[in-house]
Amino acid sequence: MRLYTYGIIDSGRRIDESILGLEGARVYNVPYCDIGAIVSELATGSVQDITKQSVLAHEEVVEKLMEHFTVLPVRFRTVHDSTEALLAMMQSHYREFRDNLDRLRNKVEFGIKVIWPSDKIKECIVNACRKSCKKAFVPTDSPNSRFMRDKFEQYRLNEELEKKADKFVGIMDMFFSKFAAEKKLKQLRTADLLLDAVYLVEKSKQGDFKEAFEHIKSARPDFRFLFSGPWPPYNFVALTKETEFHDNSTQEDLFDRVIQDRELIGADKI
């Protein structure tokens, strides 16, 4: 029987709570030393389709485990051919799993997306840039002059836009970082998406982190803020050995869409 794997936990004990995973199968723990792999048996032998329903089923199992254990989430659709194969993997990566579990104990992940009014900000920059350009160039209708002026305006627009983004993100990150153990920031992934960030926060500081978010949100009513969490630490598991165990390249976009759907319909976990 093939084993679908959800995550590694910091316990080799049996799971007392009844948790159902993919295909409605019972979830149980396969222990190795003082850690365990949470699995369920696949009647079909594999997960054929990546669907929103199957991703949510995977995520719900990990979230339930998070209530009682430290969890290292596993890549969606990770399947082992046998218990022996699973135990061999755990033996090979035991030290890294143990180090990650110790580092992530009592910590959760929060996601923050900030959407700014880029069109209005660009308009203000362009107006200021044009005033500056008039002083920088001698008025003329020659093609070369118009070309140089347009290039200079575009350069100034991009430069000033990045400066404003750096300023806004710096201020927000200063508030959030006070209560975060680790962070990962992506700035201006699109013109409108000013910040796409994840923060690793100690459970005891969740209230302070949320309060900092509300403070920033109220200070910038012209920005749109999306907040999600607490989640298991998907983005903070650090493995150095080559393994497909935590390669999120095929699932990141789908997980992101599922989480974003929850944010947009107001079902996030603030």
Image (tube, rainbow, N blue to C red):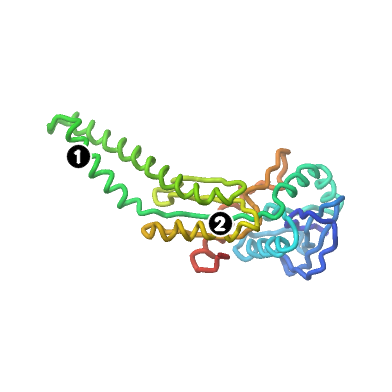
Q: Position of residue 213 (x, y in %)?
A: 50, 58
Question: In the image shown, does 24 or 178 lie closer to the viewer?
Answer: 178
Q: Taking 179 as reference, is 99 left or right? A: right
Q: Which residue is mark 2?
A: 209
Q: Position of residue 55 (x, y in %)?
A: 63, 61
Please state which of the two labelled residues, at mark 2 or mark 1, is closer to the viewer: 2
Mark 1 Cα-neighbour bin, 10 Å: few <14, some 14–19, many ≥20: few
Q: Tell me if residue 186 comes above or below residue 4 in the rendering.
A: above
Q: Which quarter of the figure is the N terminus placed in? A: bottom right
Q: Identify the mark nearer the N-term, 2 or 1.
A: 1
Question: In the image shown, does 217 or 188 lie closer to the viewer?
Answer: 217
Residue farthest along the left direction in this orientation: 140
Q: Tell me if residue 160 comes above or below residue 248 in the rendering.
A: above
For residue 131, the mark is 1
Q: Position of residue 189 (x, y in %)?
A: 46, 46
User: What is the CA distance from the residue labelled 2 to the residue labelled 1?
Assistant: 42 Å
Give the amino acid type for the residue marked by disc 1 in the picture. Answer: Lys
Tell me which residue sits at (40%, 57%) in the image. Answer: 219
Q: Taking 162 as reference, is 35 left or right? A: right
Question: In the image shown, does 104 or 42 lie closer to the viewer?
Answer: 104
Q: Which quarter of the figure is the C terminus placed in? A: bottom right
Tell me which residue sits at (45%, 47%) in the image. Answer: 171
Examine the image and state in which quarter residue 166 appears: top left
Q: Secondary structure at mark 2?
A: helix
Q: Secondary structure at mark 1?
A: helix
For residue 229, the mark is none
Q: Taking 234 as reference, is 37 left or right? A: right
Q: Position of residue 118 (x, y in %)?
A: 35, 51
Mark 2 Cα-neighbour bin, 10 Å: few <14, some 14–19, many ≥20: many
Tell me which residue sits at (56%, 46%) in the image. Answer: 184
